[in-house]
Image: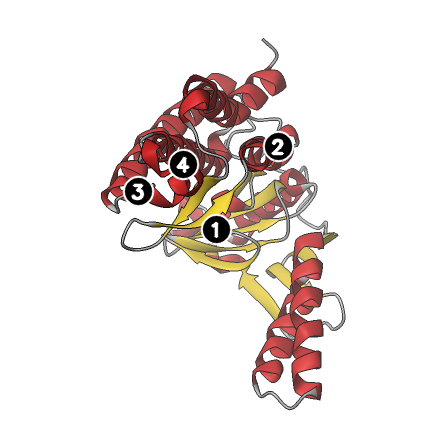
Amino acid sequence: MRPVRRRAVIVVLPFVLAWAVVVATFAGLRDRLPDPLATHFGADGKADGFTGTGAFLSVVTAVLLGSGLLTLVPTLRLTKGLGAQRFAVALGYGLSGLLGYAFASLLFANANADANADATRASRASLPLWQLGIALAVAAVMGTLGVLLASRDAASAGGPGNGAAAPRLPLAESEVATWTRSVGSPVLVAVGTGTALPGAVLVAVGSGMGALLIFVGLVCAALARCRVTVDRRGLAVASWFAPRPRMRIALDRIERATSREAAALSLGGWGYRVRGGGSALVFRSGDALFLTLTTGREFAVTVDDAATAAALLNTLIERDRPTAGERG
């Protein structure tokens, strides 16, 4: 099986299986199910929301298969295995397990409702809160399975692209080189716009909360497009609208640079993210530059042509630091 097709199957499979299990459960219990179905339960486990049987299947199909398609999109852009998407794959597997169990247990709750209630039968359905514990356990097991499958795919992908050290650029001692690329994030544009506009409306009607929403929207807009530059001073990331403020990592703080494909979710989401062992500036899924700092921490930024940036950084680092003979 081709690698892209194999990765697509790995990502989508749990959602398709969860959908098939729910549909099979529905078909097996069809004669015992009331119409409408009890589809929402309060903290006491009693039904307080209802949906027609036809609409229920439509919702199940949209939620499960739609979620599978959404998780598939970033996967199709990867060319170097699912290793960078372990978190996203685990999240997808866990979500499919949680939703699949929730939908199936809901059907069983309706099928076991008091058959003598007739028209009000669905209102007699109950779903105890302990069922949530089982659903979370199923999600945990499925998430673990997702991590294992993603790790196995990463191992089989191999190759120098999976985090191997980038090659050096052939620069003479007297040569100077600069690498720069612009990178944008449609997600941050959408979030910024979707946050700032409601904020403006709230300010217009006199609500203080609107100012906070506008501030968040402006921060997202500022990060929506940046220019990433590598030169003899190190790495710099500046916003599209002004050269400052900017983020700079000096060359003497960088131990080495590598490049690989990464999913936005595997780095913690979009924007500036702080995670265990380092931080990242995430604009989209795809090619990313990873810096190992002299402190042992890691910094990542998603940008096109990251391999060239990493190679130039490694060359500049090697040139900047004295050899053992020079130190002696």
Q: Nearer the viewer, mark 1 or mark 4?
A: 4
| Circles 2 and 1 in contact, beta carbons < 8 Å | no
Q: How far is the residue under mark 2 from the one under mark 4?
A: 39 Å
Q: Earlier in the sequence, mark 1 or mark 3?
A: 3
Q: Earlier in the sequence, mark 1 or mark 4?
A: 4
Q: How far is the residue under mark 3 from the one under mark 2?
A: 30 Å
Quadrant for the N terminus in the image: top right
Name the image colouring: secondary structure
Q: Which numbered marker is on residue 175?
A: none
Q: Which residue has dot 1 on it?
A: 268
Can residue 176 be seen?
no
Residue farthest toward the top in the current orientation of the protein: 1
Disc 4: CA contacts within 10 A as few (<14), some (14-19) or many (>=20): few
Q: Which residue has dot 4 on it?
A: 118
Q: Which residue has dot 2 on it?
A: 69
Q: Earlier in the sequence, mark 3 or mark 4?
A: 4
